[in-house]
Image: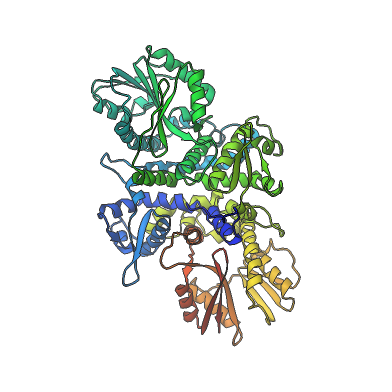
Amino acid sequence: MDSYNPTADGSIDDEAACLYVMQLVTLSAIPMTLKASIELKLLETISLAGPGAQLSPSELASRLPFISNPQAPVMLDRILRLLASYSILTCSLSPSGERRYGAAPACKFLTPNADGVSMAPLILLNDKVLMESWYYLKDVVIEGGVPFNKAYGMTTFEYQRTNPSFHKVFSDAMSSHSTIITNKLLEIYDGFNGLGSLVDVGGGVAATLGKITTKYAGIRGINFDLQHVISVAPPLQGVEHVSGDMFESVPNADAIFLKCILHDWTDELCVKLLRNCWKALPEKGKVIVVECILPVVPDEAIATKGGFQFDLAMLASSPGGKERTENEFKSLAKESGFSDFKSIYIFAGYWVMEFINSNAVVDSSMDEEAACLYAMQLVSFSVLPMTLKAAIELKLLETIFLAGPNAQLSPTELASRLPFISNPQAPVMLDRILLLLASYSILTCSLSPSGERRYGAAPVCKFLTPNADGASMAALALMNQNKVLMESWYHLKDAVIEGGIPFKKAHGMTAFEYLGKDPRLNKVFNDGMSGHSSIITNKLLEIYEGFDGLGSLVDVGGGIGETLGKITTKYTGIRGINFDLPHVISEAPPLPGVEHVGEDMFKSIPIADAIFMKNCWKALPKNGKVILAEWILPVELEQVVAAKGVINVDLLMLVNPGGKERTENEFKSLANEAGFSDFKAIYIFSGCWVMEIIK
């Protein structure tokens, strides 16, 4: 994901900051769209077409099994366009103007390799079971505990025993990731040479250990895990499966292998495990640890962002789990009785550490490295919008912003300002949340002389904290990541195959019908729309002069009337009519110069873009005009924040109300078909345009 580019003095203009915020608050569109594309095997189909090949949405739709949706090519085009805007796919226009899509480098790690594995199963981080945890992150910061436990009343590991299908999804993800990292480990690391025996603690179904013993045939492998895990492990030559509890004891061996085990547990439990390992080793034996290593201060490297995303995923789902810095690993080794420490970089943010020897540095292929790092960032992308949601609910950005220009606060200072705080671990949890946000330039971060991290407001905070009108884009983040709206994404694959609107498949009614029945969600929706509308309308009134001379103005779908109220305040001669559904109007406050009217803009007329426009045409006098404020999609994809934000929104429209964003030519076609004679577009701000279509 692109960040914005500050100027030489570190400043940034409002346009760039607001565009970046728009991308942030709609970011859940990326991982959830990627999830559906993986389920539909779109990336795999494109990759199998061969190097340099590109397929059209129609060609891809024809290869989907059991397809019964005539609109599938249109839906696929919108899905693929989003993926191409994030360089997951390539895109080009054919001479006829049709978009065609090919495999970008990241596809190599999102489609099966020679071992039949990829990073794609890690999309499990967006599985409905794990996503539920995020809605408890705010509560856990205040009260303590583990979000997953609050959601389900048990730990992740206990839950897997009760849900075999989720356990399989989890095991497949771990096995696939393990295979990719292990292949690189075996290319780079020679520390298995000369070993007679090796225990893989928490080895799962022994995918990793099997690869090690295949290359090093002299090693006797012991795959050590819980009984319910070992029970589904296949027989492997040179490997013995042993069940047990690693916190009680570990089988004896020349070396003990811990891959992505320590990040599941608290420091205290890690020390307990490592001391058991120390007891099981001979003199000069070693523990071989494979884990991510976090930087102390966040930077904008993909590896850093991916590492912090996984750290927050651990916070949400694991009892005390976390990613660690190199110094934190050294402390664990020392406290457990090991005398020395050696770290060697492997691949895609992962390191191998020996709790015994000296340092070494190894090179890696950076082209492949970058592609794999990006794939890992993509599959864990849902962590960022859900963490941002919790930060907004806790008012962390607002508290930091109100501390003043250039002020920085420590996690401890922030925790002390939280209301009703009863969690002694709140500063530690906040530090992990703020680290992720700083890695995406939402906050600044620096180290105090004592080594404590301190956080300040980056330019984008201006649009994520209340402005003079009390509005911000933060409400849009809360709306887009709301549990009701997120549920729609789990039906996107089925909607492509069968037709229909994902929201309606999830809830049995349209989004607007649902809002009429759920006052709580209706308020979340109105707040989201109102915050964004206020910011855009302020810029509209600075730039656009087309309201001059009007006697009356109807705002169709005007929500609670905030936009129209701003217009009639500046143009006092305008009689404003705020026109929306009755359940929306019921929340609208009285406004001077504005009449609220609650009706259906379609009435009994079938829903169609041209009909909607024709209804407006009938209501206008000669030379009257419709004023549209909308995003405009680019025809050819651009790798810029503005394009990504509007394409994110297009996918949000696809899954919830069933609407869409449009290109300028599509707007011109609507105007022409509805009987309007002229069209004019003026850019406003943050990807939004004002368009006049004149009768």
Work out which quarter of the rendered image holds the C terminus and state it. bottom right
Picture layout, residue 467 above or below residue 438: below
| 206 lies left or right of 86 | left
Query: Residue 235: x, y in percent?
Result: 26, 26
From the viewer's side, name the closer residue of 489 and 628.
628
| Looking at the image, residue 277 lies above or below residue 648 | above
Q: Residue furthest right?
A: 592
Using the rendered image of the protein, determine whether residue 181 is visible from the camera's viewpoint.
yes
Query: Which of these two is toward me, 268 or 494?
Result: 268
List the single residue furthest toward the front.
Answer: 8
| Image coordinates for residue 666, horizontal then vertical, percent | 45, 73
Task: Inspect this view and state whether residue 247 appears.
Answer: no
Q: Is residue 89 above or below residue 142?
A: below
Residue 388: x percent and y percent? 57, 46
Count of numbered badges drawn on the protein: 0
Q: Please name the residue shown 29% across and 52% down the image.
A: 47
The type of colouring in the image is rainbow
Q: Residue at x 30, y 18 (%)?
A: 197
Tell me where residue 654 appears, x and y as whole percent.
Answer: 47, 60
Which residue: 64% across, 37% down? Answer: 411
